Image (cartoon, helix red, strand yellow):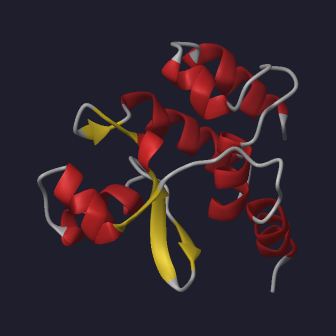
Amino acid sequence: MTAGLRAWQAWHMSETAPARTWLTIPDVSERLSSTPGRVRKLIEEHHLLAVRRDKALVIPDVFIQNGEPMPELRGTLLVLQDMRFSPEESMQWLLEVDDSLGVAPIDALLAGRKAEVRRVAQALG
């Protein structure tokens, strides 16, 4: 087991972690009026991020806005990938409150603070 996965599991079970609704691939395909194959393609192309939870791939529902993957998410995921974050580490960073942002990065993205979120992500490396 990698250190990142252990950190994700520890964080995932933390009582201080923000409450999120998790969707399976079939749930996401229904929300996007798409197929599970298309959802997997969106994950591969970094339009969505999924992690394993109880042996199933899951995606936080907040990543889907107005029936589409959140547009600001892809560029942020690419920055995190460039910083060599694993999917689990990226998920943790996106959903956990970041001191420099004052909120979870995903919430800052929802508030229109895309450039600030990406600057903070770039500074992580």
Is 80 in front, or is 98? Answer: 98
Give the vertical position of 36 relative to 118 (above or below).
Answer: below
The one nearer the camera, 1 or 80, is 1
Please name the residue shown 53% across and 15% down the image: 111
Which residue is depicted at the point 84% across and 37% down?
124
Q: Position of residue 85 (x, y in %)?
A: 72, 55
Q: Quadrant of the N terminus?
A: bottom right
**Residue 12 image point, x, y percent:** 74, 63
Q: Is the residue 57 above or below the residue 30 in the image? A: below
Q: Is residue 86 visible?
A: no
Identify which residue, 125 or 9, lies in the foreground: 9
Q: Residue at x 47, y 80 (%)?
A: 56
Find residue 78 and report its horizontal and vertical position in percent. 55, 43
Left or right of 90 in this view: 62: left
Image quarter in which the C terminus is found? top right
Residue in view at x 66 percent, y 31 percent: 105
